[in-house]
């Protein structure tokens, strides 16, 4: 009998069935994936260049144009998570030596600044304490002082629970010869955004929040101004995978025959298509209203439990992710663990500047319901009764 050359045996864990418990995901994402979207992702795959697949991609593009409220031709889904779309935006907009102003009031600005520095850009930071937002005046001062070619700002700051008003920022940036780049990963579909009317130059989001699709694909769109800046580049974008010229061609945005660039995550795109279809069926305005109303109910309920909301200004509260201060005398980890163990429910602690300070509760897409508001409030009441002063 031939002796095996294998030195590593098959892992025992893989010889057992996959375990995926049922959970209600009320953290800042991912959110639960409804049956229809799961079923779409479970369909047999197509080749990434088959005409039927290209048709699905065209439908995704139309869905993103609706969700973003844009007519931009250069609109597509990145094969990757929200970070990948953030990198796609920055890798294409910035060349070594370009100046970018990054509005930082939470972790997402910090991440954008980190990526821009790695690209060799001159990075200036405009700072606000976590829980606050930027006024047009703050932005204008930064534009005048630093003369950036790009401004980065986060619409839905999911680490702090702040909704950034965008009115007038696009026009302001353009008056100062600057492009406006907006992160709407946590807010798209849950709070109004109008890419064309608000003169946003690059906008990106994610699949796993309000769109209730699995993580791994990320809508993005470039305005004509942004496209022109990319065309004027002296150097090629540092990333081939995220080169918007190649991606735009694969997505049929440039009128040229579509060429193979990479193998698209076919099933993720099936799911994203259904997530966008469900948003189109519900309609943006009723989706925004549903998120607003359920967030308001949640905030009321949290106040009734004697908890303190982290974002003081009511109109600056992000309708998709609510931040509440960790109550005095409690360890946040006990609370999140209690909800997971006793209610099969995820809420999370803070992130970046809000670590140890807040709990974050997400109500996104199909998870934004009155029933889930009641469930999370009941579970929190239960936790507050059981976790008091433990291990502090
Ligand atoms: N930006 C914001 C506002 C986010 O909430 C997130 C995800 N929490 C990201 C970017 C990054 O997305 P991902 O985790 O999908 O890479």
Image (spheres, helix red, strand yellow):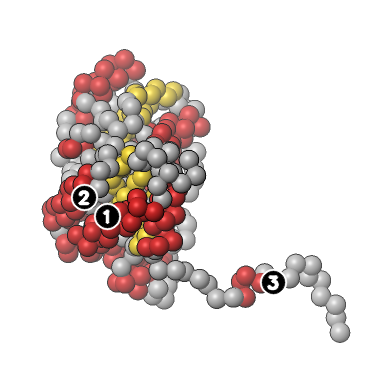
**Where is mark 2, residue-wise?**
301
Mark 1 touches mark 3? (CB < 8 Å): no
Q: In terms of depth relative to the viewer, which is nearer, 68 or 282?
A: 282
Q: Residues within 10 Å of mark 1 (few under 14, many from 20)?
A: some
Residue 61 % position (x, y): 28, 56
Comparing labels 1 and 3, the label whose residue is closer to the camera: 1
Left or right, 191 with reference to 257:
left
Q: Is residue 139 visible?
A: yes
**Where is mark 1, residue-wise?**
377
Say which label, 2 or 3, has the lower sequence index.
Answer: 3
**Where is mark 3, residue-wise?**
10
- Residue at the image position 62 percent from the left and 70 percent from the top: 13
Residue 206 % position (x, y): 35, 51
- Residue at the image position 45 percent from the left and 27 percent from the top: 121
- Quarter of the image for residue 98 reads top left
Work out how far the residue at label 1 is from the one at label 2, CA to CA, in angstroms.
Answer: 7 Å
Work out how far the residue at label 2 is from the one at label 3, CA to CA, in angstroms.
Answer: 51 Å
Rendered-image quadrant of the N terminus: bottom right
> Which secondary structure, mark 1?
helix
Q: Is residue 164 visible?
A: no
Residue 210 % position (x, y): 28, 55
State the residue lying farthest toward the top: 145
- Residue at the image position 26 percent from the left and 30 percent from the top: 133
Q: Tag count in the figure?
A: 3
> Which secondary structure, mark 3?
loop
- Quarter of the image for residue 358 reads top left
Residue 260 % position (x, y): 45, 58
Left or right, 111 with reference to 290:
right
Residue 336 disc label: none
- Residue at the image position 15 percent from the left and 51 percent from the top: 293
């Amino acid at each position: 009998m031939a002796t095996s050359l294998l030195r590593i045996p098959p892992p025992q864990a893989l010889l057992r069935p996959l375990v995926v418990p049922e959970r209600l995901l009320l953290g800042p994402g991912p959110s639960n994936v409804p049956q229809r979207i799961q079923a779409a992702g479970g369909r047999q795959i197509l080749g990434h260049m088959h005409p039927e697949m290209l048709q699905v991609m065209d439908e995704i593009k139309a869905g993103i144009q609706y969700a973003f409220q844009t007519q931009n031709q250069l609109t597509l889904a990145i094969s990757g998570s929200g970070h990948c779309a953030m990198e796609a935006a920055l890798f294409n907009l910035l060349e070594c030596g370009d100046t970018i102003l990054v509005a930082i009031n939470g972790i997402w600005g910090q991440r954008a600044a980190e990526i821009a520095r790695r690209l060799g850009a001159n990075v200036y930071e405009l700072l606000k304490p976590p829980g606050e937002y930027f006024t047009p005046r703050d932005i204008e001062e930064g534009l005048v002082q630093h003369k950036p070619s790009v401004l980065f700002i986060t619409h839905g700051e999911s680490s702090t629970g702040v909704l950034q008003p965008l009115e007038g920022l696009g026009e302001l940036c353009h008056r100062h010869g600057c492009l406006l780049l907006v992160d709407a990963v946590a807010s798209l579909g849950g709070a109004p955004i109008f890419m064309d009317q608000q003169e946003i130059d690059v906008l990106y989001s994610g699949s796993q929040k309000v769109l209730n699709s699995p993580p791994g694909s990320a809508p993005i769109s470039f305005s004509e101004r942004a496209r022109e800046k990319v065309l004027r580049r002296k150097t090629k974008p540092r990333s081939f995978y995220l080169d918007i010229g190649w991606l735009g061609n694969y997505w049929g945005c440039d009128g040229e025959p579509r060429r193979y660039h990479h193998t698209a995550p076919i099933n993720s795109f099936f799911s994203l298509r259904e997530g966008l279809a469900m948003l189109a069926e519900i309609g943006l305005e009723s989706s925004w209203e549903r998120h607003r109303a359920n967030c308001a109910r949640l905030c009321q309920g949290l106040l009734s439990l004697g908890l303190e909301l982290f974002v003081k200004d009511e109109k600056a509260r992000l309708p998709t992710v609510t931040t509440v201060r960790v109550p005095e005398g409690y360890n946040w980890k006990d609370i999140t663990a209690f909800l997971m163990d006793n209610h099969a429910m995820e809420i999370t602690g803070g992130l970046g500047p809000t670590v140890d300070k807040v709990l974050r509760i997400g109500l996104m897409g199909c998870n934004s319901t009155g029933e889930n508001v009641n469930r999370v409030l009941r579970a929190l009441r239960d936790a507050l009764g059981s976790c008091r002063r433990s291990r502090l």
